[in-house]
Image (cartoon, rainbow, N blue to C red):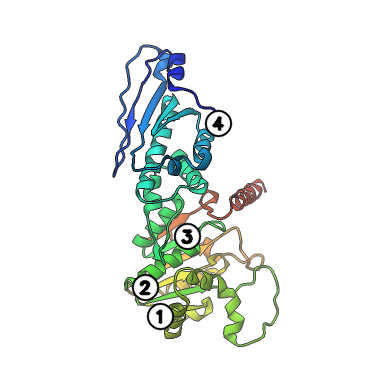
Amino acid sequence: MALSAPDEVSEAAGAPDILGEARLHSRSPRLRRMKAGTTNPVAQSTTEVKILVPGRHDMVSLLGQRDELLKLIESSFSTSIFVRGNEITIAGERSEAERVAYLFEELLALLDAEHSLTTESLEKTIDMIKTSEQRPSDVFSDTALVHRGKAIRPKTGGQKRYVDAIRKATITFGIGPAGTGKTYLAVAMAVRALLAKEVARVILTRPAVEAGERLGYLPGTLAEKIDPYMRPLYDALMDMMDADKMAAMIQRGTIEVSPLAYMRGRTLNDSFIILDEAQNTTPEQMKMFLTRLGFGSKVVVTGDVTQIDLPAGQYSGLNAAREILTDIDGVSFIFLDSRDVVRHKIVQEIVEAYRRFDESR
């Protein structure tokens, strides 16, 4: 890690020792910059920003063990960062230095909110600083559900928009590749609404379509035949509820997990309804599902249009909905992409590689 002393940078630019200063305060950190005037055009584009980290913060929690977080920041921006005690000096081109200062402001806000910084969360924060107008501290401080002390939160700007849309819209479409948290966050919001008594029941459904394989006739009762298709929804529920409570609610019908075919002919009032794997619906099935909506209900439809398992030539009901429903008030479409993948980093790279391959064809 190359650290340049602040006064060396200033002298190289022919500017005063400190062109800008910033202090970050407790509850709502704000940058206060005092820039020295100069006629040197080179110096005008070069800035130093000093940040005084409040004493309540351990520098290791901000910079990481063996400065691993600091090294990640340095490798992501074209600035020099010099640390002395609890003072951080950022030197470089003005806009870049101010952007790094803003990053530290957001990291301190996250520490104030009792978030532990990791390389993963820092990478997401840096990405938001570079590509989004959303404040990382606003994104990461949102909470969909808390279970056994574990908070389920958005981890990207796209996920934050998705959660906000679910709160506001009557029908929300979450469309994006695998690993973007579409189903998981939707189930978390459904469980939260149920526990808060905003709805009387939660209904989780998906089309029973084989993903390329031909499984033949499965043994057992109808429920046992269908269960493998519903397993991902059960898995999400198990992460958010105690097993006994979940089983009791399923037994009473407060939580229902069933295939899409079971929705026909019903009107679903006071319910939070999730249609998962919606790319595998036909246009007729999608219309049938959406018209089940009753009073006091909310619908979330999730799907990945790059993984359609319908027979060749069959048009996806999710693609049809994108074309037909875009101008209806109360219907929101949120599109997630590889930047919103929250699984292993290589999954993000795989999703992006397939996207480029599909576009090239």
Q: Can you identify the residue that label 1 sits on?
A: 254
Given residues 269 and 76, the one toward you in this image is 76
**Gap between marks 1 and 3 measured at Cα:** 24 Å
Q: Is residue 314 above or below residue 142?
A: below
> Marks 4 and 3, how far apart in space?
41 Å
| Gap between marks 4 and 2 measured at Cα | 50 Å
Query: Is the Cβ of the residue at disc 2 closer than 8 Å to that at disc 3?
Result: no
Question: Pointer 1 and pointer 2: residues touching (CB < 8 Å)?
Answer: yes
Q: Which residue shows up at 36% across the image and 65% down it? A: 170
Residue located beneath label 2 in the image: 194
**Going from the N terminus, do you reach mark 4 or mark 3 first?**
4
Instruction: Look at 42% across and 57% down and name the residue there.
Output: 153
Query: In the rendering, which numbered label is found on residue 174?
Result: 3
Crowding around mark 1 (Cα neighbors within 10 Å: few <14, some 14 to 19, many 20+) is some
Which residue bears the numbered disc 4? Answer: 1
- Residue 235 makes an appearance in the image: yes
In what element is the residue under mark 4? loop
The tag earlier along the polypeptide, 2 or 3, is 3
* Res 20 quadrant in image: top left
Query: On residue 20, which mark appears?
Result: none
Q: Nearer the viewer, mark 4 or mark 2?
A: 4
Q: In the picture provided, is 91 more to the left or to the right than 221? A: left
Q: Residue at x 41, y 69 (%)?
A: 190
Which of the two discs, 4 and 1, labels the residue nearer the N terminus?
A: 4
- From the viewer's side, name the closer residue of 303 and 310: 303
Locate residue 84, reporting x and y percent: 42, 29
Amino acid on which disc 1 is placed: Thr
Marks 4 and 1 sit apart, C-alpha to C-alpha, by 56 Å
Query: In the image, what residue type sits under mark 3?
Result: Gly
Residue type at the position of mark 2: Leu
